[in-house]
Image (cartoon, rainbow, N blue to C red):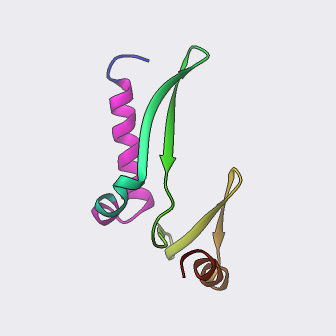
Amino acid sequence: MKKGFSSVFQFLLCTFICFFAFSGMAFSQQFSAQIKIRFESLDGEDICVVETKKAQEPVFLKGSYGSEFHVRVGNTTHMLDAEQTVRYIQMNWE
């Protein structure tokens, strides 16, 4: 990886996470400790590894129509409707 590229990539990734997917600085301050970004070499290639911990409370994305709730199922992401979101939160946080 070119010198400095990992720093630029990490900056862009954090900017995307904080300002485009979520609600800006509020997300950054509240959840930044939950996200760890590092770079590793695998088979001669540099890769970016992003690790996250389960949040202590539900986190909503800022979507086209307001707040959205998404869950990971394996290697896929699914947006839940209101009823599914309530059930999921009850099962996982209450």
Furthest toward the top, the residue is 44
Residue pictured at 37% horizontal, 46% vertical = 14
- In the rendered image, residue 85, in percent from the top left (x then y), is placed at 61, 79
Confirm whether the magenta stretch covers residue 72: no
Left or right, 67 with respect to 42, comes to left
Quadrant of the rendering where the N terminus is positioned: top left
The residue lying toward the viewer, choosing from 42 and 82, is 42
Please state the horizontal and vertical placement of residue 49, each as a whole percent of the image.
51, 36
- Picture quarter containing residue 12? top left
Depth check: 60 or 65 in front?
60
Residue positioned 37% across, 25% down in the render:
5
87 to 68, vertically: above or below: below
Image x and y of residue 54, in percent: 51, 61
Q: Which residues are magenta?
A: 5-27
Q: Is residue 60 above or below residue 45?
A: below
The main secondary structure of the magenta stretch is: helix
Residue under the image location 54 percent in, 82 percent down: 94
Q: Residue at x 49, y 25 (%)?
A: 40
- 33 vs 38: above or below: below
What is the x, y in percent for residue 43?
A: 62, 16
| Left or right relative to 67: residue 72 | right
Q: Is residue 13 magenta?
A: yes
> Is residue 1 placed above or below 48 in the rendered structure?
above
